[in-house]
Image (cartoon, rainbow, N blue to C red):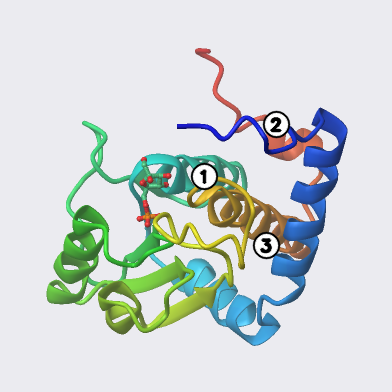
Amino acid sequence: MFNHCVEIPSYSSSQVLLLKELDRTLAAVNEAEIAVAREMILLARRVFVTGAGRSGLALKMAAMRLMHLGLVVHVAGEVTAPAIGQGDLLLVASGSGTTAGAVHAAEVARNVQAQVLVLTAAPASKLGQLAQGLIVIPAATKQDHGGVRSEQYSGALFEQSVLLVMDALFQVMWHERGESAEQLWKRHANLE
Ligand SMILES: O=P(O)(O)OC[C@H]1O[C@](O)(CO)[C@@H](O)[C@@H]1O
């Protein structure tokens, strides 16, 4: 039940809140962890991405950009995704680090000697412990309703941060590869 005595924030104040939270959270992401993630992505034979709900959707956006860079990328669970194996990388996003599908996928990947790179707000979680590479995003997890790490609903700050962390990493890798936007554009889907 909503408490109607609570002041309803305006659209613009909400926008400011989001930007402040993102600024603070992204500034706290460890650059050494990003460097390791970059290495793991570039060394992988193929990259698989997975995550539940909005966390998975944010990684699907990142997966598209990695494909635009010319990497071989699969979204786990899609009908065309092959088996993951040795030399592959599983990129998993889970704020809580406890979502069953995400943990299971990481276990499968480890069992077949694939590498596991995790973006999470909970590095001590089961998923965090399965990771060989970790990007810790100090945001609220989906059931952290305390409002301290974020005033946004559920895992929104984590999910937004996943997209921005991966887009920033894409920006680095794009310029390192020295390809023009026109060259990347040739890899864009032409059946959409
Ligand atoms: O990031 P987690 O903790 O794995 O949660 C997965 C997803 O579950 C949800 O709560 C519901 O889809 C999303 O907000 C979140 O992205």
Label 3 sits on residue? 169
Q: 143 and 185: which one is in front? A: 143
Label 1 CB-ligand 1 distance < 8 A? yes
Disc 2: CA contacts within 10 A as few (<14), some (14-19) or many (>=20): few
Distance (Cα) linking label 1 and label 2: 21 Å
Nearest the eye: 108 or 144? 144
| Closer-to-camera residue (18/82) | 18
Q: Which quadrant: the N terminus?
A: top left
Label 1: element kind? helix
Horizontal side, residue 95 vs residue 163: left or right: left
Q: Position of residue 45 (x, y in %)?
A: 38, 64
Label 1 amino acid? Ala
Residue identified by numbered label 1: 58
At label 2, the amino acid type is Trp
Q: Residue sitting at 50 percent across and 13 percent down?
A: 191
Q: Quadrant of residue 127?
A: bottom left
Please tell me which of labels 1 and 2 falls first in the chain.
Answer: 1
Kind of residue sitting beneath label 3: Leu
Q: Report which residue position mark 2 lands on.
A: 185
